Amino acid sequence: MHNGQPNQSDQPDNPASNGHTKHPPGNNFGLKQAYDIRDLAAKQALELADCHPTTVQELAARAQALRNNTAVWETAAERIRIMRGRPLPGSLKPVKAPKSTHRRPAEPL
């Protein structure tokens, strides 16, 4: 029974208390959503790992659910990478220093 006092479900989530680091101010709702989706997919996959199917149908359904959760996790992780401005691994090539052109000292003609 709700007697006018807030309970835990009425209080908003604090990003610092749920394991996420604080993000700079601005429109970070999409980034927070991507983190939440990624974390939920990982949690559900771990819960499915504890499930022990007894029939072939249950085994197939569990395998499909794990595959789907893996795809969701990968997609969310990719979105997080993009929103944070991180390039793909190996895509940045080191910038070569410009060759210095050595000029010969000026000689009389």
Image (cartoon, rainbow, N blue to C red):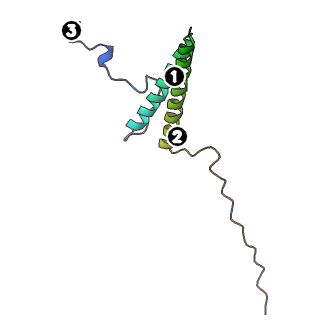
**In the shown orientation, is residue 19 left or right of residue 105?**
left
The answer to which of 99 and 82 lies nearer the viewer is 82
Of mark 2 and mark 3, the one earlier in the sequence is 3
Quadrant of res 27: top left
**Which residue is under mark 3?**
3
> Which labelled disc corresponds to residue 65?
1
* Secondary structure under the numbered disc 2 in the rendered image: helix
Q: Which mark is residue 81?
A: 2
Spatial CA distance of label 3 from label 1 is: 41 Å
Q: Secondary structure at mark 3?
A: loop
Quadrant showing the C terminus: bottom right
Residue drawn at (53%, 23%) of the image:
64
Residue 105 place in picture, x, y as percent: 77, 81
Disc 2 residue type? Arg
Which is more toward the observer, 21 or 29? 29
Q: Kindly identify the amino acid type of the residue bearing the numbered disc 1.
A: Ala
Instruction: Kindly report which numbered mark, 3 or 1, lies closer to the viewer in this rendering.
Output: 1
Q: Residue at image x 72%, y 67%?
A: 99
> Counting residues from the N terminus, which is met first, the one under dot 3 or under dot 1?
3
Instruction: Quote the CA–CA distance across marks 2 and 3.
Output: 44 Å
Q: CA distance from mark 1 to mark 2?
A: 24 Å
The relative height of residue 32 versus residue 47 in the rendered view (above or below) is below
Say which label, 1 or 2, has the lower sequence index.
1
* In this rendering, the label closer to the viewer, 2 or 3: 2
User: For the view shown, which residue lies furthest in the left direction?
Assistant: 4
